[in-house]
Image (cartoon, rainbow, N blue to C red):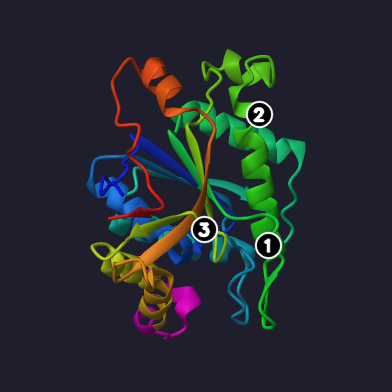
Amino acid sequence: MSNHFYIPESAMAIVAHPDDIDFSCVGTLARWAKAGARVSYVLCTSGDVGIADPGMTREKAIEIREAEQNEAARIAGATEVIYLRERDGMLVATLELRKKLVREIRRFRPEVVITSDPTRVWSGDSYINHPDHRAASAAALDAVFPAAGQPNLFEEIAEEGFKAHKPRKVYVTTWDEADLFVNIAETIDIKVEALRAHKSQMNGWDPEPRIKEWAATRAKGKEMAYAECFRVITLVSDEDWAARKGCVIDCDEEESVNE
């Protein structure tokens, strides 16, 4: 098994709310950012119903949660944070949302897109996946393929100067059915600090013990202390990507367990 750690030139995470990235995949994104990758966060909503304090307005919640997410992104080394500002709690995977995501993909041109699994409705007997999570990931996958790579679809985006772009890989965050386990031992503390930036959501709770417990559970049996896990879909083969980029790559660069 190769110990080579795959580092894309660019990665885009598409999620529903502030803190979704930090709970799910920021350890991996931070590793990539430390290695020089450009990292884009695209949030479909700004979490404007995610603060239940008396007297809280949507406008104030947006201000608070975007500031928290901006700080978390800074901690992780992200290049940019984009807010689409769809209504929190009412997100639907519409054609209009797909178009907005296609525009961001064509503009940023990520090598990898990370999102969650739109088919996950529950886990165990105590968790129902938020409908916004499912809507965001469904829209993200539909935007990635085939829409973003089809030049004759959403031609008006091309007229803005953003040409069709097909990402190389999609990483789907998952709790099971994973085929890639990313070692985040060197970024687990970044993950904890990024989550601590979401003060309105922590409510005095220190995420460190639970986050490290979860990451250690994912890493069990994988010869690493902490892990994030993904199901990986390769849309462009290593050979075709190398031809597109005009370079030589290690076609064995990605394995079921990465160091």
- Front of the two marks 3 and 2: 3
Q: Which residues are magenta?
A: 197-209
Question: Looking at the image, which is closer to me, 158 or 143?
Answer: 143
The residue that mark 1 highlights is: 120
Tag 3 near tag 2, CB within 8 Å:
no
Residue at the spot 56% in from the left edge and 20% down from the top edge:
164
Point 75% across, 36% down: residue: 95
Drawn side of residue 29 relative to residue 140, left or right: left
Foreground: 163 or 54?
Answer: 163
> Which amino acid lies under the numbered mark 1 shown in the image of this protein?
Arg
In three-dimensional space, the C-alpha distance between marks 3 and 1, rounded to whole angstroms, equals 13 Å
The amino acid type of the residue labelled 3 equals Ala
Disc 2 packing (10 Å; few <14; some 14–19; many ≥20) = some
The residue pinned by badge 2 equals: 146
Q: Quadrant of the C terminus?
A: bottom left
Where 164 falls versus 142 (above or below)?
A: above
Going by the image, does 96 lie left or right of 31?
A: right
SS at mark 2 in the image: loop
Query: Who is closer to the viewer here, 199 or 9?
Result: 9
Residue 186 rendering spot, x and y as whole percentages: 23, 62
